[in-house]
Image (spheres, grey):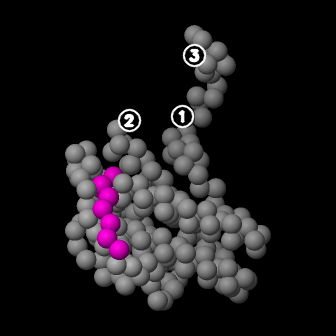
Amino acid sequence: MSAKTLLKGILAYQAWANDELVEKLARMDPSSDPGIRHAAIRLTNHIHVVSRIFAAHLKGVAHGYASDNTPDTPEPRALRTALAEVDGWYLDYLETASEQELGDPVAFTFTDGDEGCMTRQEMLTHVVLHGSYHRGEIGRMLAEIAVSSPWDTYAVHLHRFEPARRLQGEREPAEIDGDT
């Protein structure tokens, strides 16, 4: 599997997982555990802002953010739309980037002023891993208030969108071990 194919899969996973999470946050009662709900939305907004920042780095343009979050907290529905837009941008970007371009280094400045340099594929991977890390953090927060978080693992995503993968489990054990 090429790096581009793998990146396409994990970026599609990210778009799905972000959508599942924000939909869950939107359905939460704002008056029930407002502190945790607010913190979860803030952290989801942080995922969005960092995604926007790295998209700007990939485009070679200024991102306009002074930090890795915004002063205001968006409503979940607006955040859902914004995340879908940036997640779509990443998928579109990958369609136009060549394998060679993905290996190109990009120098940039972090919001704290530190300098950085990553290849384009490292940046794409960072965006996915960053979002996954924080979605896990949000899941832990939701568990504290007895709200189940979406079951958003990469394996769940693959099997939901490619149900034929489930059929692989119907093979005989000898076939799985390579004895046939």
Q: Is residue 98 above or below residue 128?
A: above
Secondary structure of residue under mark 3:
loop
Judge the density around disc 3: few (<14), some (14-19), many (≥20) Cα neighbours within 10 Å: few
| Local secondary structure at mark 1 | helix
Residue 80 place in picture, x, y as percent: 48, 72
Vertical arrangement, residue 14 with respect to residue 52, above or below: above
Q: Amino acid at mark 3?
A: Gly
- Please state the extent of the stretch shown in magenta in the rendering: 114-121
Cα–Cα span, label 3 and label 2 = 20 Å
Residue for badge 3:
178
Work out how far the residue at label 1 is from the one at label 2, CA to CA, in angstroms. 19 Å
Marks 1 and 3: CB-CB under 8 Å?
Answer: no
Q: CA distance from mark 1 to mark 3?
A: 20 Å
Q: Which mark is residue 164?
A: 1
Q: Is residue 159 visible in this depiction of the protein?
A: yes
Name the spot of residue 64 as percent of width and height, x first: 31, 82
47 in relation to 153, above or below: below
Mark earlier in primary sequence (1, 2): 2
Q: Is residue 85 visible?
A: no
Q: Secondary structure at mark 2?
A: loop
Q: Which residue is at 38% across, 35% downward?
A: 1
- Mark found first going from the N terminus, 3 or 2: 2
User: In the rendered image, which residue does mark 2 sit on?
Assistant: 1
User: How dense is the environment of label 1, judged by Cα within 10 Å: few (below 14), some, or many (20 and up)?
Assistant: few
